[in-house]
């Protein structure tokens, strides 16, 4: 009997506990429901079955575009009257971007055909119409689509159900549009939606239950993935439906039964708007002429809500994106280096004096050795001689050689030498060891008949060495002539042979200039002529080259921090301009970024490079993503873009 009473008491207490636990929850739910928004109007749809909507204007009228699991895409006017439909296909996700007045680009994933489809939404004599542009089959269903506008190009981000994303440039080509792949992106499962803020250049991706990610939309920048909003900020487990109101600067999204809005520039401030919807779990929400519109999953009803919306972000008018730097299209590229990771580093150009079109590009693979390319970018020869970092060369007549190249070797600390014959054959002349812990930067120059080189130790000091030819082809020596103390790391350097002036880059400091003769005489020290300022020069300061053309001579410097190339007057005293190396869709070339070394020549290399050639290392080789390589740029294109007179 006692045992029976014990069980009865235990059950009673358990039930009481459950009721006690439920009591406050019921009370919270009542409070929540009392504050929930009720729709002021309902827009009934006919056989649409939609999970996404977006507002747009067309021909002076206001419309809503809806994904339809029954009829592909459906366009309705402000009152819900249907204006057009694809009448076929099963679409749950689409992306929308304004191309021009009364022209909208639509990307949609059709589950029936398993294709990404591009369509143009415009008007014909004032009547809306939708036209087919292109389609591309996919290997998995796409769960998130969003457009980005970059350098007057349209980029599309598409993420599939496994979390694998792809970035494409979508562009017209003759009779149809094309998808040109740029790079893959990796997220993991359960991505629900994405949006791009073109003003800040950020791609936003909702991934329940982890939160909303923010990363750079530009493939030539570091990804810099960070949390835009954490799960606790979203107050829900099933969140997504990202929609950016570009006019107000608010990012709208749904989470369980709520609609939220965040200031796109200040997400840390928390949600600027958070309201539950009565008897509804929205999956897509937008603002429309001062009203909130929401849509449940697979719904035929759009709910309108009269509610006070958050004001436009106060800083929207003052906010400006990064200063747009002029862009010059790449003209060519070398084949990728064999080593993975950060491998390609520094190029040099040998100008064939008899046949300039047969000139060579020497490029270091700092994990294995030296690569030799022709001007088409094809690999001609490889020398697996160690971890070569920087390479430079100068003409010299010695036996069969018409030029000597030198490269810092970090495997066995020293300088590797190479001879170049008149026929363009490159020969390895061996390694000359140095009393240096880690040879890093290097630049070669001529002092009269003497061949000289500056070599930096990664720890700081820079040595001046003379390259002394031997009696035979390989009996060469290095003689130390001077030592230059610098306060931090130096890699990029170049010498103006005629002026006997050394320019070198202190990676975090800026560009320094040194009168070599005065320094050797003990009467001069380096001068900082162009400090890092974050705009003209953004750390790290890397590769350097001199473009020699009389009054139109320039010092060219790699500004690694903003993926650009800065031009200064020949003496380095005045900033002339800067540019980025951009995508060339006609040749299926990506741009360049995170550049280490560069080299430039004013020689005429034929019709493709009539005014000279700039070669730059590309730290992120895209279209498709591959190991690093070197990009080739026509100086004529640089001169035209920067209006060099």
Image (cartoon, rainbow, N blue to C red):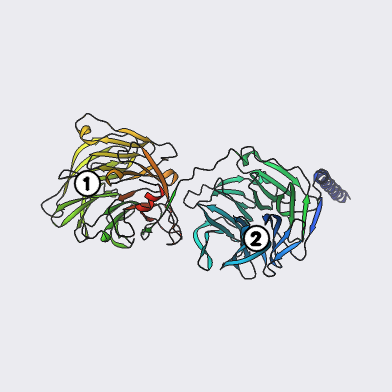
Under circle 2, the secondary element is: strand
Q: Nearer the viewer, mark 2 or mark 1?
A: 2
Q: Nearer the viewer, residue 584 or 160?
A: 584
Residue 557 horizontal side relative to residue 124, left or right: left
Vertical side of 388 occupied by 272: above or below: above
| Residue at the right extreme of this rendering | 1
Residue 464 visible in the picture = yes
Query: Which comes sooner in the sequence, label 2 or label 1?
Result: 2
Under circle 1, the secondary element is: strand
Residue 342 horizontal side relative to residue 102, left or right: left
Q: From the top left corner, tell me how far across and down residue 299 is, in percent.
A: 75, 60
| Residue at the top extreme of this rendering | 523
Residue 471 horizontal side relative to residue 598, left or right: left
Can you say which quadrant of the picture contains the C terminus?
top left
Q: Nearer the viewer, residue 592 or 122?
A: 122
Q: From the top left corner, tell me how far across and down residue 469 is, in percent.
A: 14, 49
Q: Nearer the viewer, residue 33 or 27?
A: 33
Look at mark 2 in the image and give the residue it sits on.
93
Q: Residues within 10 Å of mark 1 (few under 14, many from 20)?
A: some
Residue 495, picture quadrant: top left
The image shows a total of numbered marks equal to 2
CB under 8 Å between discs 2 and 1:
no
Q: From the top left corner, tell me how far across and down residue 301 is, in percent.
A: 78, 59
Q: CA distance from mark 2 to mark 1?
A: 62 Å
Look at mark 1 in the image and give the residue it sits on.
433
Residue 438 visible in the picture = no
Q: From the top left corner, tell me how far across and down residue 246 is, in percent.
A: 63, 47
């Amino acid at each position: 009997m006692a045992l029976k009473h014990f069980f009865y008491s235990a059950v009673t207490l358990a039930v009481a506990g459950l009721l006690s636990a439920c009591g406050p929850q019921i009370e919270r739910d009542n409070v929540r429901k009392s504050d929930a928004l009720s729709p002021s109007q309902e827009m009934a749809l006919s056989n649409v079955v939609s999970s996404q909507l977006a507002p747009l204007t067309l021909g002076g009228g206001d419309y809503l575009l809806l994904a339809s699991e029954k009829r592909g895409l459906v366009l309705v006017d402000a009152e819900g009257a249907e204006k057009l439909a694809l009448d076929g296909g099963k679409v749950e996700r689409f992306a929308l971007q304004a191309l021009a007045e009364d022209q909208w680009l639509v990307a949609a994933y059709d589950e029936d055909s398993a294709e990404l489809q591009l369509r143009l939404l415009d008007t014909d004599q004032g009547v809306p119409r939708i036209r087919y542009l292109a389609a591309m089959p996919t290997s998995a269903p796409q769960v998130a689509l969003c457009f980005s506008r970059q350098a007057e190009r349209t980029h599309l981000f598409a993420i599939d159900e496994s979390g694998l994303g792809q970035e494409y440039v979508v562009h017209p080509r003759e009779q149809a549009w094309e998808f040109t792949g740029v790079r893959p992106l990796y997220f993991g499962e359960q991505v629900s939606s994405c949006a791009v803020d073109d003003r800040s250049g950020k791609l936003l991706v909702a991934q329940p239950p982890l939160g909303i990610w923010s990363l750079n939309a530009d493939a030539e920048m570091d990804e810099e993935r960070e949390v835009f909003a954490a799960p606790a900020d979203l107050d829900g487990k099933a969140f997504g439906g990202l929609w950016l109101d570009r006019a107000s600067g608010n990012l709208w999204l749904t989470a369980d039964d709520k609609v939220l809005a965040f200031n796109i520039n200040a997400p840390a401030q928390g949600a600027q708007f958070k309201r539950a919807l009565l008897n509804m779990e929205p999956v897509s929400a937008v603002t429309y002429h001062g009203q909130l519109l929401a849509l449940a999953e697979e719904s035929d009803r759009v709910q309108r809500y009269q509610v006070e919306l958050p004001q436009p972000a106060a800083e929207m008018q003052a906010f400006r994106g990064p200063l747009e730097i002029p862009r010059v299209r790449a003209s060519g590229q070398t084949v990728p280096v064999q080593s993975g990771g950060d491998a390609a580093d520094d190029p040099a150009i040998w100008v064939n004096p008899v046949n300039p079109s047969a000139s060579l590009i020497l490029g270091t693979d700092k994990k294995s050795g030296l690569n030799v390319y022709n001007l088409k970018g094809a690999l001609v020869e490889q020398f697996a001689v160690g971890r070569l970092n920087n390479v430079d060369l100068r003409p010299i007549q010695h036996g069969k050689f018409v030029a000597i190249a030198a490269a810092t070797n970090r495997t066995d600390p020293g300088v590797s030498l190479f001879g170049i014959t008149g026929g363009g054959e490159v020969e390895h002349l061996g390694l000359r060891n140095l009393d240096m812990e880690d040879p890093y930067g290097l630049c070669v120059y001529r002092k009269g008949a003497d061949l000289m080189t500056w070599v930096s130790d990664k720890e700081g000091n820079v040595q001046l060495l003379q390259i002394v030819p031997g009696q035979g082809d390989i009996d060469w020596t290095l003689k130390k002539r001077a030592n230059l103390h610098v306060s931090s790391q130096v890699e990029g350097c170049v010498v103006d042979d005629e002026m006997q002036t050394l320019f070198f880059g202190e990676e975090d400091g800026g560009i320094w200039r040194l009168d070599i003769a005065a320094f050797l005489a003990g009467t001069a020290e380096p001068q900082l002529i162009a400090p890092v300022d974050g705009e003209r020069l953004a750390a790290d300061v890397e590769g350097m080259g001199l473009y020699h053309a009389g009054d139109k001579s320039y010092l060219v410097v790699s500004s690694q921090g903003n993926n650009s190339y800065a031009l200064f007057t020949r003496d380095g005293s005045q900033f002339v301009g800067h540019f980025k190396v951009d995508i060339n869709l006609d040749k299926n070339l990506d741009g360049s970024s995170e550049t280490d070394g560069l080299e430039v020549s004013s020689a005429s290399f034929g019709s493709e490079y009539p005014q000279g050639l700039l070669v730059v290392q590309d730290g992120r080789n895209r279209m498709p993503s591959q190991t690093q390589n070197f990009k080739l740029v026509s100086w004529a294109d640089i001169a035209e873009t920067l209006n060099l007179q």
